[in-house]
Image: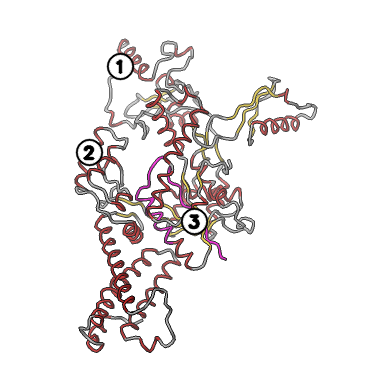
Amino acid sequence: MEQFSMLLPPPNVTGVLHIGHALTLSIQDSIARWNRMHGRSVNWVPGTDHAGISTQSVVERMLMRKTNLTRHEVGREYFIEKVWEWKNEHGPKIMMQTRNIGASVDWDQEYFTMDDKHSQTMLGDVALAVNSKDPRYKITPAHDENDYACAQRLNLPVVPIFSLDGTVINAPHFADFIGMTRWETRNKIIKMLKLTEDYKGTRNAKASVINRCSRSGDIIEPMLKPQWYVRCGEMAKRADEMVQNGEISLIPNRQRVIWQNWLSQINDWCVSRQLWWGHRIPLYRVTWADKSREEVWVAAKSEQHAREKALQSLTASDSTVQADNSEISSITQDEDVLDTWFSSGLLPLTVFKSNSAAAAGKPLSTILETGQDILFFWVARMAMLCTYFAKVPPFSTVLLHPMVRDAQGRKMSKSLGNIIDPMDVINGASFGKLMVNLQRGNLSNKELDRSKVELRKLYPTGFQQFGADALRLTLILYTQQTQQINMSLDNIKASYHFCNKLWNTFRFVQMHASERGVQAGDSWSDGIAERLSVFDKALLSRLHHMLAVYQRAMETYRLAVAAEAVRDFVQKDMCDRYIEICKLALFGKQDATGQVKYLPEYEWH
């Protein structure tokens, strides 16, 4: 049996499904069901992402709220245990929502990106930058990305100021500021400048770019730290070649240019993250009992494995050494974890590792369907990693859908109050419920007040109960908008009415078929063609035409065209014409000759 395999992009375990996830599920479910109808063995694999930064942030806040302790106070092992408890408590919510949307995924294949199967500022001024209009600029390479780049160009010294807890480091040249926070340091420097009459006052803050953490709101302080990088040049070149030579097809085709531009200008990838939640980097620092020997870093599966590899490297470099454990002073695993995108980039290798495709030199899966906004962050990195490790593409086709925005074309966000929760569309939600959901978000009081006003303007009566079918049909029809989807409840309402019409048509046919002794599943007998009326033949002709359009559209992943073909056939040909003609005959109002006036409404194909 022909195999069809597809990976469901993993939503973050911290959240709930949003309308973009519903779009992905609707598209992928249509593709999966169509392939099953063609007799293929479909392996559609669902899962969730461990979401390193988001999850750790949520659990840290919970820990502080419940125990008034930080993760550093409870320790790494205890903290990770609490994260797993949180994941096991909240993770099933996404599974339930996926089921409610009606996705026919293979739940027995469900993955989690942390599963075991995975592989695994003034005090630092060192120069002046001269500006023709304003010479009062300083270079602080240890705590500013642009200044650091400048220091690299001009070979300037890099002077760190702050430690990881945000206080001034213990160094002789910072004697007056040691242990102070950055705000205490700032205020003291201003006072000192005022005493020497060197303080020139403040400047308009709007002219400054101050980066803040999107989750905590804190001002970000760039720091210099050793990091692990992945050299991407050769991998990126191979990933680009796969698209340009057709080994991987991108739909829509215009994404090929974006793909090529990104990969041709790629930098080495920093995969270190200063977190505890995630795949801990499998690198070990080994120091020797002989202090004259330089320490080494080894990649290993465990501490014991690292010990063995370190000793092997020692004997390889010096054959006179009789290496044993006494040669090693210490072995310490790196504290950092891998970038979440690196972990999720390995998914095709781990989810489809049992496939025979790789051994045959074929792609690991059939198609990847996802949003065009993560073409580089996830899709390109999967292509690079799979090509490096498995020597084959992770998929043969990439189908990219547009981003979902509100009816005015604005990005959906909690602060704008325009978020559409797919569960609210399916089950219905009062305005009060929408307001409660809004208040659960991490919005400031100012953002919350603005969002409440916007929410009342957009959805004053809440959402009626539309059901999953109406939502899914609407989202599929929207895919004809290739740049962005401007989501409107009016279109969901139209799909809801169509679904009602389809259901009423089924009930009408079932009722009258039962009255005439026709059972569901009865096959057509020989000679049926002689008993078909001209209207029956016209409907079958339209059905044949619709199926041809539908088939061509699905083969080329034009799902909106396929959905429109089905909708128009059911609504116009079957309900508005054929059923109405049938009613005349069923209820004895006209015989067949009286129905001939409806014949011109049909187009023959």
Place of residue 143 in the rendered image (x, y in percent of width and height, measured from the top left):
43, 26
Nearer-N-terminus badge (3/1): 3
Residue 156 place in picture, x, y as percent? 49, 25
- Residue 463 locus on image (x, y percent): 25, 51
Residue beneath disc 3: 44
Numbered disc in front, either 3 or 1: 3
Q: Residue 444 colored magenta?
A: no
Q: Which residues are magenta?
A: 1-30
302 vs 370, left or right, is right
Mark 1 highlights which residue? 199
Q: Do labels 2 and 3 touch, CB within 8 Å?
A: no
Helix, strand or loop under label 2: helix
From the image, tell me which residue sits under label 2.
Answer: 450
Nearer the observer: mark 1 or 2; the answer is 2
**Which mark is first along the chain, 3 or 2?**
3
Residue that extends furthest to the right in the rendered view of this protein: 320
Q: Of the residues shown, which amino acid type is indicated by label 2? A: Arg
> Disc number at residue 289?
none
Q: CA distance from mark 1 to mark 2?
A: 39 Å
Q: Is residue 516 above or below residue 559?
A: below
Q: Residue type at mark 1?
A: Tyr
